Amino acid sequence: MERIRNIGDFFRMYVDGFKNLSWGKPLWVIILVKLFIMFAVLKVFFFRNPLNEFDSEKEKSEYIYNELTKGHNINVKIKKYGTKCN
Amino acid sequence: MEQSVIDWSRAQFALTAMYHWLFVPLTLGLGFIMAIMETLYLKTKNAKWKKTAKFWMKIFGINFAVGVATGIILEFEFGTNWSKYSWFVGDIFGAPLAIEGIFAFFMEATFIAVMFFGWNKVSKGFHLASTWLTVGGATLSAVWILVANAWMQHPVGMGEFNVDLVRTELNDFWAVISPVAIMKFFHTVISSWMLGAAVVIGIASWYMLKNREKTFALDSIKIASVVGVTGIVISIITGDITGNQVAKTQPMKLAAMEGLYDGANGVGLVGIGILNHDKTYNDGKDPYLFDISVPKMLSFLATRDINGYVPGINDIIKGGYTTQEGNIAVPVEEKIARGKEASEQLRLYKTATNEEDKETAKAFFKANSKYFGYSFFNSAADTIPPVSLVFYSFRIMVCLGLLFLILFVVVIYYIGKNKFTAARWLQKTCLWAIPFAYIASQAGWIVAEVGRQPWAIQDILPVQAAVTNINASSVILTFFIFLLLFTTLLIAEIKIILKAIQTGPVESVEDEQY
């Protein structure tokens, strides 16, 4: 291919580059297989974000709040600072 | 929460991050070296530099292709295994990661193609600019990842805790690019030059041992050894500044790095030491079975005063000492109590039925909110990181860094005296040194990340609160899937690189296709 003079030549550089791959071919196979495993297998079957099961920000924050405060000892006495509001 | 979920989630993230970090430092280090080689080609017009640069671009390309997107799994894990963490800090952590995605995609995808496909199709100057921009894109993408990581070590730039959404929120983006973040960037990226240099010198030494491509090999070694020495010297400086920052922002990490239980003025730095593994917090036993220390050095590194006070693990837990900022350290037991009080007030806020109660609870929550993260601990001892892992990893990183400095200086000396070709012992040493560069690099991350434990975000969110409440068996299953996937990728990379090395640099560089 001749020197790049316009945007069309620029895209043809990509096309020619990929067409004439030699040692790069197995690398692209690796990349494509890897992306397939990541997005079509792992992402679909193993990576379920529990927060996506909720529709609103409020529901998500409620879930987080419940998870964060689960099992906390809420009757703790504060030695130095401890006045409680109720 | 099952302990096994926490442990396996932690192990899974560590596995993914450590495998990812096998590819990244070589991209950063080798990229810089090959860009220098191409610059020399443009300056000298000597085709040998083009041949040299193209060979190392091939190794760069293989490493880049195999390593690309392994980091995506880390981002999946944020959602799956660390959903509470993602929610809690997503507003802050998301910004640098989003910028990273944009930079990484556009800069690297555009210019890496010109770098590989554009020889003879663009001017030499434009090609060189594309090479530098590819390296720059990779480095810029590292900037944002490291900014995000530094924020976890030293969280800044947040506004008031949002009690309605139960999350911290960003109110000053530029504060996130803190001195800690800047130093983490320089230390991490520039120490990668050492790894890139070690790989180049090691592979080039193999050619010397095989009596092949001697000019190419010697030219490569000349460039790489200078880059390696420069990288290590800058890393020593940035490491020193980072250590000083850690003393101020993460004193527990520093104490773990040194195995220091009882602080004092004028504390020495343990150069070589064996920890007493029976030692536990506050038991009065000697923390070392054996140690050789540099007198007063730790005090100097931590405070810039040879008689400065450095708190140990016991002091940090007991509190009461004066910090470098001039504050009186709060005892950990009190932080835990105040954290639990914050948790209680958050519950009262959430369950209050009238505005007045809500406002009162909010006010009390606010008074203790900075200790909310401590509410997840049951005892002060829970706040101590795994001391021996941090202690030994730190020494491995420093010792290997210094050994590489000596190795590179010796290489420069032998090259300068024209003795390198005959010094087969040195060539063998350089070849066998390659894995140790990776060990040094990984050890650095172990110090940074394990030293921060038990916190996911320092003083804000501990790991047990950040982890998603999912089935342990799912985490174990995915751990082994990743182990298999990453190991396969690593074997593939090594095989392809070894084949490329066997083939060697191509004589007719004009005709070579990628």
Image (spheres, coloured by chain):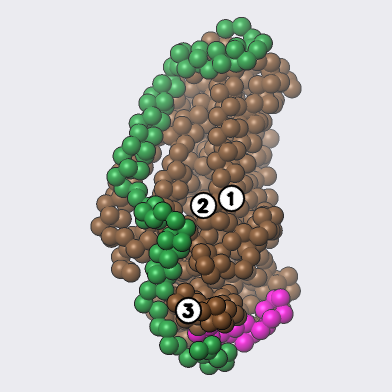
Q: Is residue B265 above or below residue B391?
A: below
**Secondary structure of the residue carrying numbered label 1:** helix
Q: In screen coordinates, is B83 left or right of B29?
A: left
Residue that label 1 marks:
B95
In the rendered image of this protein, which colour is used for chain B? brown
- How many dots with numbers? 3
B337 within the magenta span: yes
Q: Is disc 3 placed on a helix, strand or loop?
A: loop
- Across and down, in percent, residue B440 comes to 51, 52
Residue at image x 69%, y 55%?
B174
In percent of width and height, residue B189 lies at: 61, 46
Tag 2, which chain? B
Magenta residues, as a range? B314-339
Q: Is residue A73 magenta?
A: no
Q: Please, what is the three-letter code of the amino acid marked with disc 2?
A: Ala
- Label 3 to label 1: alpha-carbon separation: 33 Å
Labels 3 & 2 near each other (Cβ < 8 A): no
Residue B141 seen in this snapshot: yes
Residue annotated with mark 3:
B352
Between tags 1 and 2, which lies in front?
1
Is circle 3 on the same chain as circle 2?
yes
Residue under the point 42% across and 61% down: A59
* Mark-to-mark CA distance, 3 and 2: 53 Å
Q: Secondary structure at mark 2?
A: helix
Separation of disc 1 and disc 2 at Cα?
30 Å
Q: Residue furthest top?
A: A2
Mark 2, residue position: B440
Mark 3 or 1: in front is 3
Q: Nearer the viewer, residue A75 or B283?
A: A75
